[in-house]
């Protein structure tokens, strides 16, 4: 099936919201999924995409978010297990070519990488940033 | 076998007790302290650790590297899946079994190599479906992870099978009558065995052909 170039973001918290706003500003088609109506309502003004309310661990919700047509999935909730679950469904059931997830723990990070899922560990990135220029 | 049971629910407790009765060496990883404490009051000589099987540190604490099997009864499907994958791929646990809450998720678990996936909703739903059409079915057991059905069925007088031989019955491939209970005798039949009213048959079949086999034996009540 031809993939539209659309990005699905799962998780509309502070990270997800900021990310969604940025990508909208770059002109990308973005769909954001979250369980909470309040979180979806609180997405930043720059966000111009589609909101889907639902539990991302249910296949029905992922279908409503048009995951079968997406070419990128970014799973950025604060739960590593949720992010992994959605990423694996995206890759193995929906054939999404680009899948990247937020992960907080370095052992889990190496597990995910072994499952061919790109990861971003905000804790490591933040620690690197704080450590920059700190010599003594 | 060294088994890790991940989960602190009642079903986890019953699984642990059953495993211990079969002399397996069981360790429990309960996510919540109250669950761990409750389990501790009901179980003897069992190592119970508070922690999540999705946490690599907790899996280290229960020496997952030495475990033969993990049973994932975590609160949610994503937790159970992560627990299975961490155990298998990071700690080398050879076999994982998971109870899945949403039957739609079974496929993903199987794709990712979880050895056995059980969905109680699916098993019960399947049994209800088969029961709804048939009277005279006394017992149904599901084996081999749901792939084999063993059904005990009594032939009523109006059964289309009465007076015919097993060969004449032409059960679908994948189904057979393993035993006939007639009065007090247990007969392990060959093709020429004739069926009589009130015979209780033990039918073993691949689950996918079980309903078709049963239809040949009993009146379809629906």
Image (tube, coloured by chain):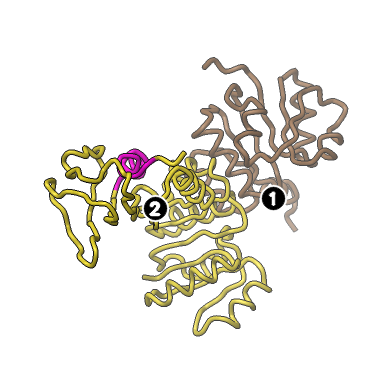
Chain colours: A brown, B yellow
Which mark identifies residue B137? 2
What element does badge 2 sit on?
A: strand
Q: Considering depth in this image, is B154 or B76 the residue closer to the camera?
A: B154
- The x, y position of residue B52, in whole percent, is 60, 63
**Which residue sits at x=24%, y=40%?**
B171
- The chain containing the residue under callout 1 comes to A
Q: Of the residues tagged 2 and 1, which is closer to the observer?
A: 2
Q: Is residue B165 left or right of residue B206?
A: left
Q: Give the residue at mark 1.
A: A123
Does the magenta segment cover residue A78? no
**Which residue sits at x=66%, y=34%?**
A61
Graded by Cα atoms within 10 Å as few (under 14), some (14 to 19) or many (20 or more), the crowding at tag 2 reads some
Q: Which residues are magenta?
A: B205-219
- Relative to residue B93, is residue B35 depicted above or below? below
- Relative to residue B197, is residue A93 depicted above or below? above
Residues under labels 2 and 1: Cα distance?
Answer: 59 Å
- The x, y position of residue B141, in whole percent, is 38, 56
**Which residue sits at x=86%, y=36%?**
A42
Q: Considering depth in this image, is B143 or A4 the residue closer to the camera?
A: B143
- The chain containing the residue under callout 2 comes to B
Q: Considering depth in this image, is B147 or A44 the residue closer to the camera?
A: B147
């Amino acid at each position: 099936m031809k993939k539209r170039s659309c990005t699905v973001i799962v998780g509309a918290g502070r990270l997800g919201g900021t990310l969604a706003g940025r990508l909208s500003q770059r002109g990308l088609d973005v769909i954001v999924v979250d369980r909470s109506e309040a979180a979806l309502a609180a997405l930043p003004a720059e966000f111009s995409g589609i909101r889907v309310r639902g539990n991302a661990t249910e296949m029905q919700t992922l279908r409503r978010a048009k995951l079968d047509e997406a070419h990128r999935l970014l799973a950025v909730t604060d739960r590593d297990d949720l992010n992994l679950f959605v990423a694996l469904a995206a890759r193995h059931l929906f054939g999404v070519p680009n899948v990247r997830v937020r992960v907080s723990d370095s052992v889990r990070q190496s597990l995910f990488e072994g499952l061919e899922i790109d990861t971003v560990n905000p804790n490591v990135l933040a620690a690197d940033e704080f450590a920059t220029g700190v010599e003594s | 076998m060294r088994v890790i049971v991940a989960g602190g629910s009642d079903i986890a407790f019953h699984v642990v007790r059953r495993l211990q009765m079969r002399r397996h060496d069981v360790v429990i990883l309960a996510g919540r302290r109250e669950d761990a404490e409750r389990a501790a009051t009901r179980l003897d000589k069992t190592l119970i650790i508070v922690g999540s099987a999705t946490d690599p540190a907790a899996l280290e604490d229960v020496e997952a590297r030495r475990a033969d099997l993990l049973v994932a009864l975590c609160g949610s499907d994503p937790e159970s899946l992560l627990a299975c994958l961490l155990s298998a791929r990071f700690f080398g646990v050879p076999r994982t079994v998971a109870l899945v809450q949403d039957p739609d998720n079974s496929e993903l678990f199987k794709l990712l190599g979880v050895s056995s996936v059980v969905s109680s909703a699916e098993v019960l739903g399947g049994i209800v479906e088969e029961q709804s059409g048939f009277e005279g079915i006394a017992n149904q057991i599901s084996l081999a992870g749901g792939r084999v059905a063993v059904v005990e069925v009594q032939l009523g007088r109006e059964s289309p099978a009465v007076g015919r031989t097993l060969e004449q019955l032409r059960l679908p491939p994948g189904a057979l009558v393993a035993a006939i209970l007639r009065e007090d005798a247990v007969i392990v039949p060959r093709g020429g065995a004739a069926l009589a009213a009130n015979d209780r048959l033990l039918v073993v079949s691949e689950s996918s052909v079980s309903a078709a086999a049963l239809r040949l034996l009993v009146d379809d009540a629906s």
